[in-house]
Image (cartoon, rainbow, N blue to C red):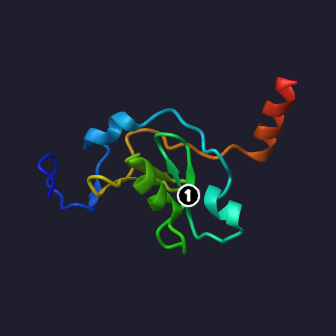
Amino acid sequence: MDANDARPAGEPSSAAARCEHFGAIRDVQPRTRGCEDCLAIGAPWTELRVCLTCGHVGCCEDSRHAHALQHFNATGHPMIASLERGQKWGWCYVDKRYFDPMPIRPPRPRSRLRTLLSKLRKR
């Protein structure tokens, strides 16, 4: 159990619950529309997670390579959110705490149209 929350680690937390690592959350955009590392090696993934510190997109632990977890192990960035449609949960790797929904609006990948329009505006 967490001293600040009556639920055991890993159990759903309410939006009112706080985590000391919420301070690591930045206003990020997912850097890619798929797992960055799987795209680089041509591997498939199951579901996607976004790092709430830098926007790295990695595959979940059910995927063969678990790149989101590898990213946490390499960087120490503590908070992720699901990039799956309709899911609003987040996870703190450090405290092993689940938040559903997250107290912030999780980032979403840009639509292809929005990406294209953004590129055209920069010309």
Name the residue located 14 percent from the left edge and 58 percent from the top edge: 1
| Residue position marked by numbered label 1 in the rendering | 58
Using the rendered view, name the quadrant where residue 11 is placed: bottom left
Instruction: Indicate the position of residue 45 as horizontal and vertical percent values.
Output: 61, 69
The answer to whether 106 appears left or right of 37 in the picture is left
Residue 30 position within the rendered picture, expressed as x and y whole percent measured from the top left = 60, 45
Taking the spot 64% from the left edge, 55% from the top edge, the residue there is 36
Q: Residue at x 49, y 58 (%)?
A: 68
Front position in the image: 17 or 59:
59
The extreme left residue here reads 3
Number of labels in the image equals 1
99 or 52, which is in the foreground? Answer: 52
Pick whichever, 73 or 58, lies toward us.
73
Q: Residue at x 48, y 54 (%)?
A: 71
Closer to the camera, 121 or 51? 51
Amino acid carrying label 1: it is Gly
Q: Position of residue 81 (x, y in %)?
A: 47, 51
Indicate whether 23 appears above or below 11. above
Q: Is residue 42 above or below residue 81?
A: below
